[in-house]
Image (cartoon, grey):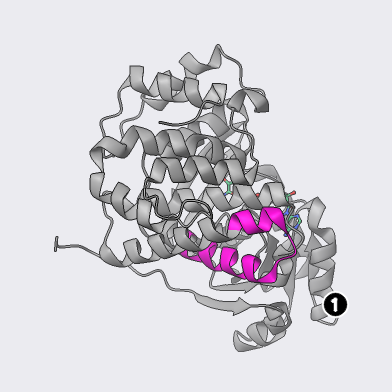
Amino acid sequence: MEPFEYNANPGRVVFGSGTLKRLSDELARQKLSAPLLLSTPQQVDQANSLKDVLSGKIAGVFTEATMHTPTHVTEKALEYAKQTGADCVVAIGGGSTTGLGKAISVRTGLPHICIPTTYAGSEMTPILGETAEGKKTTRTDPKILPGTVIYDVDLTMTLPPGLSATSGVNAIAHSIEALYAKNTNPIVSLLALEGISALTSSLPAIVEDPRSVPARQKALYGAWLCGTCLGSVGMALHHKLCHTLGGSFNLPHAETHTIVLPHALAYNAPAIPEVMQKLGQAFKVPGMEGEQDAIKGINLLLTKLKVKRGLKEFGMKEEDIDKAAEIAVSNPYYNPRPVEKDRIRELIRRAWAGEEAR
Ligand code: NAD
């Protein structure tokens, strides 16, 4: 066995169905009494349900969380937190709301209790991406990690099938890149493979029946493990490409991850034979029994999930392919296979056109 280093992120996790009801106890454990509730405008109902759970004992509700954590929204929320005398933040939602919770908490030191409702995994990471004047920057600091995470499967029942699918593939991407990370280790690999198996087996069932409780439970469990991988080790080509594409061409987060993942994996495959073998075994897509080819597995998974396969369907223009390739190779970073501009251009072209990965 190769020598390795393993850093566990601290953080308390409460997992199950109906766990939202435990919020009062969690606040009491930490001697907190004036939470500021955070959500997006689309999840006001879920924020209000929190208010009911706490019998109205809150500092306030701020419902303007926005994708990519714009700093002007954070400033508005900070002002509101100060006015209302909040002693902590409780974020209910996907990565956008979690991002706002992190942004407030890291600036003020207020404890952050996070209640995720998608599979993006941000709640398990000490990473914060913020946008100011159209530019997204990312930083890592142990103080950014939420102190407590409450996973309540019931809250994911309303996640539309399309978003469940892309958000779930976003999670799978964290685990795939964790397997070949520069600082990967046996513990993270265990979590990654278990997370991939849980999500590849449950996501097709969710798309078939979004009300399936066993599938929802398995998917959220898998997403937690995948988020842990993202928070523990460094990422490579796939995440860098998605960051470039999302930031430069205003493409949606989870959908971009879903389109790029098979192509990024196919690009790296020749450099990671052992990982490809493990992945082939971990993919549990219904219909690939006996088949252990990870690229075939991911193509089959995306077909079953009925997701869009081309970046052009989200407004990226053909002439942007060259620009994207240029930006993608401009900052050197670790990747198991050297990042070569012509090959990366071809990868982006395929993802743009919506071709199958091979
Ligand atoms: P999101 O939080 O933007 O949610 C997408 C939409 O779905 C929103 O309108 C939201 O209100 C709605 N929604 C969420 N959960 C729902 C539910 N259960 N039922 C109904 N509607 C629901 O999307 P996301 O993909 O979770 O997060 C994307 C953002 O998170 C990006 O900004 C990305 O950069 C960031 N992110 C950060 C990290 C990190 O570690 N820092 C990790 C992953 C993602």
Q: Name the residue rendered at 62%, 46% in the picture.
A: 305
Residue 84 lies, in percent from the top left, at: 78, 68
Task: Choose top left, top right, bottom left or bottom right for residue 116.
Answer: bottom right
Task: Choose top left, top right, bottom left or bottom right for residue 353.
Answer: top right
Specify start and end residues of the magenta stretch as a single range. 203-226
Residue 287 lies, in percent from the top left, at: 52, 52
On the rendered structure, is 296 left or right of 56? left
Residue 195 lies, in percent from the top left, at: 46, 62
* Prevailing secondary structure class for the magenta stretch in the rendered image: helix
Q: Name the residue rendered at 49%, 30% in the picture.
A: 356
Q: Name the residue rendered at 48%, 52% in the picture.
A: 172
Residue type for callout 1: Asp
Could one spot residue 256 in this view of the protein? yes
User: In which quadrant will I find the C terminus?
Assistant: top left
Question: Which residue corresponds to mark 1?
Answer: 52
Q: Is residue 286 above or below residue 271?
A: below
**Residue 87 lies within the magenta run:** no
Q: Name the residue rendered at 72%, 71% in the picture.
A: 154
On the rendered structure, is 86 left or right of 294? right
